[in-house]
Image (cartoon, helix red, strand yellow):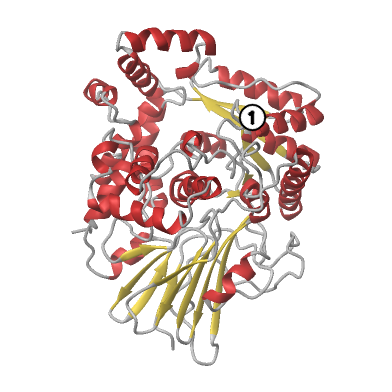
Amino acid sequence: MSKVIFASHSRWCQPGTFNDDAAASPAATCAAGTGAAPSAADATSPADNPVQQWWASAPNSNQPHAPLPTSPEQVGQWAHKQAGQWSGVVVTKSGALLSSDMPRSFPLLYRYVAGTWLVSDDPQVLIDAAPTSWDATGRLQFRHAAYTLGTRTLLKGIYQLPAASSVELIDGDPTPHVHPWKALRYHQRITDEPTFRQLFTQALEQAVERVVKLTQGRRLAVPLSGGLDSRLILSLLKLAGASDVVAFTYGTAGSREAKISQQVAQSLDVPWYFVELSEAKVRQAWQAEGGAFIRNAWAGASLPHYQDWYALRELTSTGVLPAGTVILPGHTIVGNLHGQELLDPKTPMSRKDWVELLAHQHLNLQGQQDLVAALAPIRKPLLEAVDELLTVDTLDARQSLIEWFNVRERQAKYINHSMRAYEHFGLDWALPMLDLEVIEVWERGGLAFTDEERIWYKNLIAQIYGRVSGTQPQLYAAGVNAIPAAPRRAAIKVLSALRLDKAVSSLLTTRVQLRHPMAFQALLPAGSAATYAPQLFKGRSLNGIFADLFLADAWAADSNVFTEVI
C-alpha cells in the first residue's frame, strides 16, 4: 500500500467518466459540489487497486478529458486537453502525483510525517498531524506580499503546489519533486491585428460558451465593476445565450462605480443588485463571522481575499445567490505587464535591477521594498526566478519574466484566491478568461496588443459590448486619479518642482485607504484609524496591516488559525 494519505475538505471527487470532448456534458457524474471529506482509507492506493484519482474542477460539473496523469512527463500533454479550471491528485502504489492548472485554481498542501506523505487542501489537517512551527522566511515574505513565494508556506515542512506544475511524492523519499509543465512565454508573436482579434475573440467566446453548456439550469452571476473585464464577461454570456444571469456591485453609498455598473447591466438587460457597504455594519459582521472565513480561506500561504466577503454574505442570505450559483469574476490573463518601459533590451538591467523591480511590484505592502530586496530570504527566490525565466535577454523574454512571475505568484496566490470566498458561501465559479486556450492565444500577441495600457484590449471590449448592448462604454476611474489627465500632469509638474509631489500622493493614498470606496477600512480594529494613518502615509498599505493582524490571529474574533503553531 502506498504511504500517501489524501484528505480533502473541499470539492474533490473521483471522476466516474472521462470525456472524449473537452466540453463536458452538464450531466457528468463528477458534479460532486463541495462534498464530504474522504477518509484516509478512501484516499490511499491499496495493492488491488493501483491507482486512485481525485479531481477538482470549476465549474464543478466539469469532467477530465482522460484518466489523470501518473507521471510528470504526461502532465503537459494531458493538461492541454482539459477545459476550465482543475487540479488533480493521483495516488499509486509507489507515491502520488499532484497537478495544477495555470491559475492554480485549487491550492494543495503536502507534508512528510513519519514516513507518510500527507496531502490536503486544508492546512489544519497537516497542522494536526504533527507539531508545527513557523517558517521564518515564509512569514517575512508574507508580511510584504500577502503570500509566500514558490513552494514555501507559513509553516515549516509544509509545502504548496505551484501554478502550472506537478509535484511527485515518492514513498520513502522526504523530498518533493516539482516539475513545471508550462510558463507564460511570449513567442511566435502575431502582429496582424485582424488575425489576432479573430483568434483571441474566438478563444474567449468558446471558453464562455463551454461554461454556459456546463451550467445549464443554474444561475450565473457576475461581480460587475465599472471597468473592463467584468463588462466583457457579461457581454460574452449574453452572446452565448445564457438564460439566468444576474450582476451585482458593492460599494459605499453614492458610489459612481455603482451607477456605471447599473447602466451596463441595464444596457445588457441583466438584473442588477447593489450591496451598500456601511463601515459599521461591515466591521460588526467581520468581527462576528470573519474568523470562520479566515480559517477556511488561507490555504497555508495566502492572505484570505476579503473583497467580496460581505457582499457574498448579504446576497446569499437574501437568496439572490442560491447555493450552487456560478460566479464569473473578471479574472483574466490580460493586464499582468508592469514596467513596459524596461522591455527594450537596450535599457540596461542587471540581475540586481530585476530583483529590485520584482520587489517593488510584489513585495511592497509594508512600504519597505527597497529594504526587503536586499534581504536574503527575499532576494534568493527572486534571483532564482530571474535566472529561470530570463535565459536570453530579449524583449519577449523580459515581458515573459515580468508577467509570468506576476501570474504564478500574485495572481495565483492572492487574486485567484478570491475563489475561496465563493466556496465559503456554497457557491461555484468559473474563470473562462483564464482557460488555457485563451492564455495560449494571448501569449502569441504582439506588444501592440499586450501593452501595459491595454489600449487594444479596451477597444476590443468596446466593440463587443457595443455589439451586444448597442451603447458606448463609460469606464470608472479610481478615486486617486479622478483629476483629468492634462490638469493632473500640470499639477504633478508644479508639485514636483516644489518637492511636494510625494507628500501629496501619500496624502491622497492614505485618504483613499481610510475612506475606501469598498469600506476596506472596516476590517481594521475599531478606533485604530488614527494609529495606522501615519503608517499609511509613510507607504504601508491596508493589506500590509491586515497581513500582520492575520499572523497575530488578531484580524477577526475567533480566527484561531495559529493556536497550535509553535
Q: Is residue 448 visible?
A: yes
Q: Is residue 301 above or below residue 175?
A: above
* Farthest-out residue, left: 566
Q: Quadrant of the N terminus?
A: bottom left
Q: Position of residue 460 (x, y in %)?
A: 72, 33
Residue 232 lies, in percent from the top left, at 69, 35
Q: How many marks?
A: 1
Can you give x and y, in whole percent of width and height, for residue 126 in the image? Answer: 33, 66
Instruction: Tell which of 164 and 442 is nearer to you.
Output: 442
Q: Say whether residue 119 is left or right of residue 378.
A: right
**Residue displayed at 35% across by 36% down:** 543
- Left/right of residue 50 with respect to residue 440 in the rendered view: left
Give the position of the C terminus as an image quadrant: bottom left
Residue 195, relative to residue 383: is it above or below? above
Q: Is residue 323 left or right of 308 when viewed as pictured?
A: right
Amino acid carrying mark 1 in the image: Ile
Judge the density around disc 1: few (<14), some (14-19), many (≥20) Cα neighbours within 10 Å: few
Task: Work out whether 551 lies above or below 519.
Answer: below
Q: Position of residue 360 (x, y in %)?
A: 35, 37
Q: Residue furthest front?
A: 346
- Point 49% across, 60% down: residue: 10
Q: Which residue in the structure is indicated by mark 1?
A: 455
Does 26 appear above or below 193?
Answer: below
